[in-house]
Structure formats: structure tokens, C-alpha cells
Image: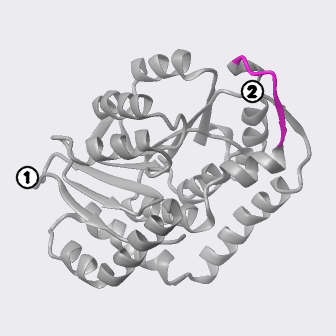
């Protein structure tokens, strides 16, 4: 029944997509238009040769991870369990289309300060750094609890950019997140893909709103992953500070723009199953 409901919701989005795109184009917001441009590029795979080559390199890392049988310990979370890298990648890495969307949104917005909560193996981080690679001021901060995953991700990231372009904050979020909030950062792009828990997601959002630039974009992954995440997403998109939201079913995008008087304008699009 849940799968049937999901497919019906997605079919409804597909049917109404042109109308939604037209609605988006009627609003005079630079970030909104650049996100729509990124969406269209990914939706229709309208890539140039440089983008194709960049994505090929990103996916080569994913494919190598899917063959990696190194065991990763979850001891830091107090769990007596180990899992192979290939299984972690299969279950936890962001899908190709959504990674490509991250890449183009960051590029189109010319984002200079990017935060990711939930490094995992660094698949999405690889796309993010590819987007930031040629930006002189671009900086990427990502957070991960498991030490072995931090080491794997750091090795991958250092193959793309110099070490001063990224920082992996390793440790339990209860410890690292308060430290992050005290540091001198103003983020213009935030990707939340860590603790898929209603209250944690809302806490990240409410606290990080104090650490953003004048116009910023949040992307939340797995907004339909559980009843708790559905509730969290509904609260976030109706928050008083949110100007626009785009519900992609898998991910939710919100724009906070202090120069825009519109509030809680909502859109629904379909990118990929």
C-alpha cells in the first residue's frame, strides 16, 4: 500500500510538472530560478563534455566503493556491529540524479561556503567538491561520526582539491555540532543528510538558520523516509523564515532570502525514483 501511495503521488507530480515549472518562473527570485535551471539540466541530462567527464569521475568512485569489502565499525555509536563499505554505499549513498542536482545548484548559485551533515563515504561530497573546485573562495565543511568513513572520504576529497578547500569534522554530532555553531561561518548552501530523525532535523535547521548568509539554500534528504521526517519537512517548509520550498519527494529544498517578501511558497516536482 505504501508503494502504491508513493507511485500515485509521483504520477500526480509528473502530470502537473509543466504547471509547476510555469508557477516557479512567475516568481522573481534569483535563487529559485537558478535551482530550476539546475533541475532542468539534470532532469533532461543536458550536460556538456566537461560535466560528463566530471560525473564519470564521481561515479568511478561510487563503483569502486560498491566493490570495497573493508569492514567499518559502528563502535562510536555504542553498537557492536561492522559493515562492509560496499553495503554502506549501496544503502546510504545519494542517488546519481540527486548528486548531479547538488552539483548544478552549487555551481549556478556560485556558492562559496557549503556545509554537509552526514559525510558517509563522501559520494555526495565528491560532487560538491567538483562544483567548488574552480571557485577561489569555495570551502566545504562536512560532518561524520565514524572515523573510518572520515579517512576514506578524506582520501577521496584530497584527490579532487587541496586540503584547505575542505574540512571533515569527525565525531558524534552532540560534540561536533556545538563547536561548529561557535565558529565563524556563514553558509550559503547546507545539505542535511545525517540523522534521519524528526527532532534532530528540526534542531539542525533552527540552529543553522543563525549561521547562514543573506540568501541561502537548504536541502534535506529522505524527507519521506519516515512519519517523523514527513512531519519535520512539513514544519520546515512552513517556517516563518522560509520563502520558497521545492518538494522532490526524495529531497526537499528551501530558500531563505532576506531580500524577498514572499513566504512559504510551495512547489512539487519529480526528478527521479
Magenta segment boundaries in residue numbering: 78-84
Instruction: Please name the residue shown 53% across and 54% down the image.
Output: 132
Q: Earlier in the sequence, mark 2 or mark 1?
A: 2
Q: Would you name the residue on which mark 1 appears?
A: 261
Instruction: Answer with left or right where residue 85 lies relative to residue 224.
Output: right
- Residue 114 colored magenta? no
Task: Work out which quarter of the rendered image holds the C terminus and state it.
Answer: bottom right
Please identify the quarter of the rendering in which residue 70 is found.
top right
Give x and y (percent) for residue 7. 47, 71
Instruction: Answer with left or right where residue 213 lies relative to residue 167.
Output: left
Query: Which element is circle 2 on?
Result: helix
**Foreground residue, 227 or 253?**
227
Give x and y (percent) for residue 73. 81, 28
**Foreground residue, 204 or 154?**
204
Please identify the quarter of the rendering in which residue 248 is found.
bottom left
**Foreground residue, 248 or 12?**
12
**Foreground residue, 140 or 135?**
140
What is the CA distance from the residue labelled 2 to the residue labelled 1? 43 Å
Give x and y (percent) for residue 204. 40, 31
Q: Is residue 32 above or below residue 199?
A: below
Outermost residue toward the front in this view: 1
Tag 1: Cα neighbours inside 10 Å, few (<14), some, or many (≥20)? few
- Residue 80 colored magenta? yes
Amino acid at each position: 500500500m505504501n508503494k502504491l501511495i508513493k507511485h500515485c503521488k509521483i504520477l500526480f507530480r509528473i502530470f502537473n510538472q509543466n504547471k509547476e515549472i510555469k508557477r516557479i518562473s512567475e516568481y522573481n527570485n534569483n535563487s529559485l530560478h537558478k535551482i530550476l535551471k539546475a533541475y532542468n539540466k539534470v532532469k533532461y541530462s543536458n550536460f556538456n563534455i566537461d560535466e560528463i567527464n566530471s560525473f564519470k569521475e564521481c561515479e568511478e568512485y561510487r563503483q569502486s566503493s560498491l566493490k570495497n569489502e573493508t569492514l567499518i565499525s559502528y563502535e562510536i555509536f555504542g553498537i557492536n556491529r561492522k559493515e562492509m563499505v560496499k553495503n554502506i554505499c549501496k544503502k546510504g549513498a545519494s542517488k546519481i540524479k540527486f548528486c548531479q542536482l547538488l552539483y548544478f545548484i552549487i555551481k549556478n548559485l556560485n556558492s562559496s561556503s557549503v556545509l554537509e551533515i552526514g559525510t558517509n563515504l563522501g559520494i555526495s561530497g565528491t560532487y560538491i567538491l567538483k562544483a567548488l573546485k574552480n571557485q577561489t573562495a569555495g570551502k566545504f565543511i562536512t560532518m561524520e561520526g565514524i572515523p573510518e568513513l572520515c579517512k576514506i572520504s578524506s582520501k577521496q576529497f584530497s584527490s579532487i582539491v587541496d586540503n584547505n578547500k575542505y574540512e571533515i569534522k569527525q565525531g558524534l554530532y552532540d560534540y561536533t555540532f556545538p563547536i561548529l555553531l561557535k565558529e565563524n561561518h556563514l553558509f550559503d548552501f547546507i545539505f542535511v543528510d545525517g540523522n534521519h530523525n524528526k527532532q534532530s532535523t528540526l534542531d539542525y535547521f533552527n540552529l543553522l538558520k543563525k549561521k547562514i548568509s543573506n540568501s541561502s539554500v537548504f536541502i534535506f534528504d529522505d524527507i519521506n523516509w519516515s512519519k517523523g521526517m514527513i512531519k519535520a519537512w512539513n514544519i520546515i517548509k512552513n517556517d516563518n523564515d522560509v520563502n520558497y520550498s521545492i518538494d522532490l519527494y526524495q529531497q526537499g529544498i528551501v530558500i531563505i532570502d532576506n531580500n524577498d517578501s514572499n513566504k512559504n511558497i510551495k512547489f512539487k516536482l519529480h526528478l527521479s525514483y
